[in-house]
Amino acid sequence: MHSASRIIRRHTISFSETMKAVRRTTLPVLVVEEIKRDIIHGHLEVGEKFLSEKELSKRLGVGRPTAREALRIMEGQGVAPKGNRKLS
């Protein structure tokens, strides 16, 4: 057996030891998580007027349908009241 082969085999590490499972999600959910991170870190405050769909899509580099769906998700979670677009 070649000595390099022995070295590689001796130092093989299982993926289960070093990697976590990848979570499947959608882009609107990632946008919601980003917005919630801003709320947690104090960049957005309760009662503050929220970005419009157009502003949100431009700022985060996503399409307007993605921004619209993210806002709907937030409305469903009670973070942003429907139509009001102020954080609650």
Image (cartoon, grey):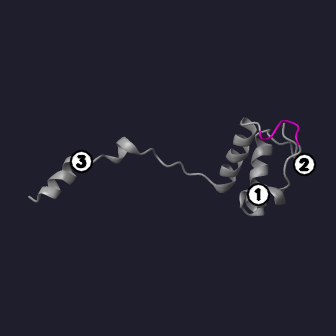
By secondary structure, the bulk of the magenta-drawn segment is best described as: loop
Q: Which residue is tagged 1?
A: 59
Q: Residue at the spot x=80%, y=41% of the render? A: 44
Q: Give the range drawn in magenta.
A: 43-48
Give the secondary structure at mark 2.
Answer: loop
CA gap between label 3 and label 2 equals: 58 Å
Q: Does the magenta stretch include residue 44?
A: yes
Disc nearer the start of the sequence (3/1): 3
Q: Tell me the kind of residue under disc 3.
A: His
Looking at the picture, tell me which residue is in the foreground, 1 or 70: 1
Q: Which residue is tagged 2?
A: 83
Q: Residue at the spot x=73%, y=59% of the render? A: 66
Q: Which residue is tagged 3?
A: 11
Q: Tell me the kind of residue under disc 2.
A: Gly
* Residue 67, x across and y down, in percent: 76, 56
Looking at the picture, tell me which residue is in the foreground, 7 or 72: 7
State which quarter of the image contains the N terminus.
bottom left
Q: Residue at the spot x=83%, y=42% of the render? A: 80
Q: Tell me the kind of residue under disc 1.
A: Arg
**Tag on residue 40?**
none
* Residue 12, x across and y down, in percent: 26, 49
Give the secondary structure at mark 1.
Answer: helix
